[in-house]
Amino acid sequence: MKLAEALQIRADLQKKIAQMNTRLSNNAVVQEGEEPAEEPKQLLPELDGYLRQLEDLMVRINMTNSQTMTPNGSLTALIARRDCLKMKVAAYHGFLESAACLARRNTHSEIKIMSTVSVRDLQKVCDKIAQELRETDTQIQSCNWTTDLIEL
């Protein structure tokens, strides 16, 4: 199985677990004399099974990521780089929105609001960071589709 397939299965298991939590919650209590729509005693083992599968898959994914080497280090290091680049792009975009939002003056006597940075220059920096993020994500996706998942 390729790493990308394992990641898709992991996402499916996470959705199933979230659904199981909802189903359990919906059947946790009933009015006296009524029966639950689903029996929690049967749902709990099903949840446990999904959690065991997820745990096994997560171990294998993490081991694969840490042992898979790319030109830029391990796949784990590349994922950490991508996650930090995402946060950096978000922070820069938020700052740029604030810096570009200047108040209009109706008269010359009103206080003039000015940006503390060159929005144009900072936008160029932000664009370069976003490009690095896209390239890093492309490297990760490429590895995901060409790397076999470690078997335990």
Image: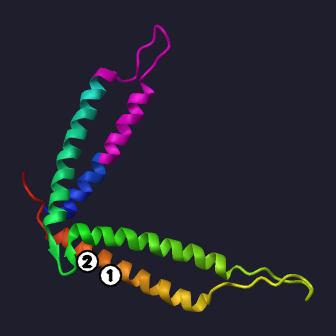
Q: Quadrant of residue 142?
A: bottom left
**Label 2: how many residues lie within 10 Å, few (<14), some (14-19) or many (20+)?**
some
Asked if the magenta segment contains residue 147, the reply would be: no
Please name whichever residue, 121 or 30, is drawn nearer the observer in this view of the structure: 121
Q: Residue at x 37, y 68 (%)?
A: 83
Quadrant where the N terminus is found in the figure: bottom left
Residue 96 drawn at (x, y percent): 59, 79
Q: Is residue 108 left or right of residue 148?
A: right
Q: Secondary structure at mark 2?
A: helix
Give the residue type that dot 1 points to. Glu
Q: Residue at x 46, y 74 (%)?
A: 88
**In the rendered structure, which segment of residues is drawn in magenta?**
14-41
Outermost residue toward the top?
A: 33
Q: Are marks 2 and 1 in contact (CB under 8 Å)?
A: yes
Please name whichever residue, 22 or 114, is drawn nearer the observer in this view of the structure: 114
Give the residue type that dot 2 points to. Gln
Mark 2 to mark 1 CA distance (whole Å):
6 Å
Outermost residue toward the left?
A: 152
**Label 1: how many residues lie within 10 Å, few (<14), some (14-19) or many (20+)?**
few
Residue 58 drawn at (x, y percent): 21, 51
Q: Is residue 118 left or right of residue 138?
A: right
Q: Residue at x 20, y 76 (%)?
A: 73
Q: Is residue 8 above or below residue 44?
A: below
How does the figure colour the protein chain or chains?
rainbow
The label on residue 135 is 1
Q: Secondary structure at mark 1?
A: helix
Q: Quadrant of residue 76?
A: bottom left
Mark 2, residue position: 139
Residue 111 drawn at (x, y percent): 85, 82
Asked if the magenta segment contains residue 30, the reply would be: yes
Q: Residue at x 39, y 32 (%)?
A: 23
